[in-house]
Amino acid sequence: MTTDLNTLLTALYVRIDDHLASRVRAERPPRLTDSELLTLAVAQVLLGIHSEARWLRLVPAALPGAFPYLPGQSGYNKRLRAALPLLKRLIRVLATDTDLWTDPVWLVDSTPVECARSRPTVLRSDLAGIAGYSYCPSHSRWFWGLRLHLICTPAGLPVSWALADPKLDERQVLMCVLDADADLLAERSGLLLIADTGYVSAELDDYLHARGAELLRPSYRNRTPRPGQALLAPIRQLIESFYDTLKGQLDLELHGGRSLAGVTTRIAQRLLALTAAIWHNRATGQPVTRSLIAYDH
């Protein structure tokens, strides 16, 4: 089967429309349906257009005839932010449609989401009091913003995620994410989570043991190596590769959000686009599950 952007968007639109078919609106239906809105949002991310105003000008040429009605930039932005709960729900819907959802291994990590650089911007930002300063070892510099905490499968399929103040302890955030979605662990006996040394914690180990899961992570250099530690290096590269896809191909660091709702919506938009690509690649039997090459032009 030929895999291209139009094929993906058509399949995605049909899947979203089927999912929303039972939903009844009390008010007058919008000219741009929710199914069209989310398909449009995924196409924007896959084609790498950061500016919403520029994207809406390019749609007629990039996707001729696909969207009979397009809102203005302000209307598109408001509709997309209002659709945040739907974005989150559809990430889960597409993920559970794949055979990767039942993978007994999860990867856990976090990455910086920078939101501002200049001091005046930080002071007047709507994120003041929510975001914070923290150090990013991979870039060897301080940043101001949030941190994306992500749980995914080894193939890169998002399982759960959260944005948090970068000063918050990664281990505490992970437990909060799992508490907020308790069914995730309840449905998986013998689950193995793989993380780095930032998740070293007896409290976290006990938390996971009580729920039938195990955490595999490196030990500190002055500690006795844990069983299976020698196998971690190549596995840990998987999540680094996953973040490289989010940052290098889906422009995670160029989200452009200036409020908590704006940043969260743009992160969800990118995770939905990645999930949709993985979902379509698995359904069409593509050899590389996380490849976006067929969809970015």
Image (cartoon, grey):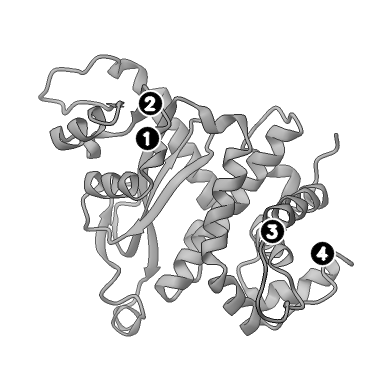
| Residue 247 percent across, percent down from the top left | 51, 52
State the residue position of label 2.
Answer: 191
| Residue 168 percent across, percent down from the top left | 22, 56
The image shows residue 223, relative to residue 26, as above or below, that is: above
The image shows residue 131, relative to residue 112, as above or below, that is: below
Q: Residue 185's mark?
A: 1
Q: Are marks 1 and 3 in contact (CB under 8 Å)?
A: no
Name the residue at 29% across, 34% down.
196
State the residue position of label 3.
Answer: 22
The image shows residue 267, relative to residue 7, as above or below, that is: below
* Residue placed most toward the observer, 83 or 243: 83
Element marked by disc 4: helix
Q: CA distance from mark 3 to mark 4?
A: 31 Å
| Residue 242 percent across, percent down from the top left | 50, 40
Amino acid bearing label 2: Leu
Amino acid bearing label 1: Leu
Instruction: Choose the circle earlier in sequence order: 1 or 4.
Output: 4
Q: Quadrant of the N terminus?
A: top right
Q: Are marks 1 and 4 in contact (CB under 8 Å)?
A: no
Instruction: Choose the circle earlier in sequence order: 2 or 1.
Output: 1
Name the residue at 74% across, 74% down.
32
Element marked by disc 3: loop
Q: Residue 217's mark?
A: none
Q: CA distance from mark 2 to mark 3?
A: 34 Å
| Residue 220 percent across, percent down from the top left | 16, 28
Name the residue at 47% across, 32% down.
238
State the residue position of label 4.
Answer: 62
Nearer the observer: mark 2 or 1; the answer is 1
Q: CA distance from mark 4 to mark 2?
A: 43 Å
